[in-house]
Image: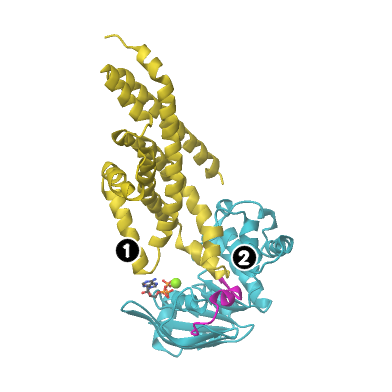
Amino acid sequence: MIKVTNLKKSFGDLQVLKGIDAHIQEREMVVIIGPSGSGKSTFLRCLNLLEDFDDGDIIINGFHLKDKNTDINKVREEVGMVFQRFNLFPHMTVLDNITLAPVKVRKWPIEKAKEKAMELLKKVGLQDKANIYPDSLSGGQAQRVAIARALAMEPKVMLFDEPTSALDPEMVGEVLAVMKQLANEGMTMVVVTHEMGFAREVGDRVIFMDGGYIVEEGTPSEIFDNPKHERTKSFLSKVL
Amino acid sequence: MDFRFDIIKEYAPFFLQGVLLTIGLSIIAIIAGSILGLAIGLGKMSTKRFVRLPLEWYINFFRGTPLLVQMLLVHLGLMPLLFSQPSATVSLAVSLSLNSAAYVAEIFRAGIQSIDKGQMEAARSLGMTHTQAMRYVILPQALKRMIPPFTNEFIVLIKDSSLGAVIAAPELMYWGKAAQGQYYRVWEPYLTVAFIYLLLTLSLSKLLHYLERKYSNQ
Ligand SMILES: Nc1ncnc2c1ncn2[C@@H]1O[C@H](COP(=O)(O)OP(=O)(O)OP(=O)(O)O)[C@@H](O)[C@H]1O
Ligand SMILES: [Mg+2]
């Protein structure tokens, strides 16, 4: 589903990704952990070309991202992204937030888009919020709407960049619950998170990044119970 | 000191003509300036240096030199090249438009850049093109933020159009000057003219407050 080879990326003189190789299977739920500044967000953002990369290649749903002839909008239609700070469109109601892309990009009739949106709102437990503006949502609610908005495009892959880091602790659970349900339904997911309990419980595989490299990867129990590398051990000892 | 209302009365039809021209010129200039300013503002955000640089200097020139100088250059320099009998009114309209385009371009750029970059990223991540993201996500938010500086620019335009009196464009200030010249009286014509300008600009700011309140609750 996603194949990354020798991915390199610099911001000016700072090399942030120093050669990443990764393979993500269909229906797999991959969690990326690592210290701040290790390049997790940058890696995730390369996967839908929110960041350009310098070297290497990414193949996603059969699209070669290195190839300049690849239509990045077509790639992004199949790759949903959920951001730390929600990024809902504040000038639109919750319903319009969700229907905008299906109508404008997928060219769905508005009725079909609305139906899908209501179905997704129900799924994330917010069907009563369809006609209000994002301003009046709590953080947890806003993030669930953001997930519904990404799902409305019926993507094949979902990327999450620290989806619960901007939330008050009591709201983390409701967002993780939605993500867990999504994983159980077989959505292919790449999730950057600091929620180690969630990573262990829901992840099929855990990738530990440090200093622009993938240092270690394996099943949650391999990484959390038997980390092989010193850097993984010292990171986990700080966060667990 | 007696206040000669008869002068005001005598000049009332001219003041009315003048104020209509002032309003008309300001509207033309704000519309032409907005269209031109939009293009310049967008061009200035271009990644191509050869597009950006001339536009930057356009903005520098029109914001960094006095409007009076610009107007004289247009009226005495540019217009005679194009027309055998340049009209002062046209010259005034052109220089006001060119000038306001520079300010509108900056208002426009600042408005767009004030929108959190996460908005563009969210829109693009949903598969929207840059143009779609601009049209449905960025511009609706940016335009709302542009209402106050934009209205302010309109107010400045109304006041600045009074410079037309220097090249004898028959707008409001021109008739004030004419009355002053005929009767050698300062207070009557200039206070009247000032009062009319005040009326125009205050109505506009009232309108601004109304629009702001209307759009602030979505
Ligand atoms: N647009 C940018 N311009 C310049 N440097 C950047 C940019 N984005 C990220 N960086 C730098 O790249 C490095 C990696 O950033 P990245 O956001 O990928 O880390 P991260 O692992 O997601 O960290 P965190 O856990 O804090 O989110 C950091 O040193 C950061 O300062
Ligand atoms: Mg990050």
Q: Quadrant of ligand 1?
A: bottom left
Q: CA distance from mark 2 to mark 1?
A: 35 Å
Q: Residue at x 56, y 61 (%)?
A: A171
Kind of residue at disc 1? Leu
Q: Are marks 2 and 1 in contact (CB under 8 Å)?
A: no
Span of residues in magenta? A66-86
Residue annotated with mark 1: B53
Residue at mark 2 shares a chain with residue at mark 1: no
Q: Nearer the viewer, mark 2 or mark 1?
A: 1
Position of residue B82 relative to residue A50, above or below, is above
Q: Is residue A223 visible?
A: yes
Which quarter of the rendered picture does the N terminus of chain B lie within?
A: top left
Amino acid at dot 2: Ala
The chain assigned the colour yellow in the figure is B
Q: Residue at x 49, y 82 (%)?
A: A68
* Badge 1: residue crowd in 10 Å (few <14, some 14–19, many ≥20): some
| In the image, residue B3 above or below residue B198 | above
Report whether A176 appears left or right of A22: right
Residue B86 lies in quadrant: top left
Q: Residue furthest top?
A: B2
Residue B17: name its quadrant.
top left
Give the colour in which the image draws chain A.
cyan
Up the image or down, B107 lies above or below A99; here it is: above
Chain letter of disc 1 in the image: B
Nearest the eye: B52 or B147? B52
Q: Which element carries disc 2, helix, strand or loop?
A: helix
Looking at the image, residue B30 sits to the left or right of residue B175; the answer is right
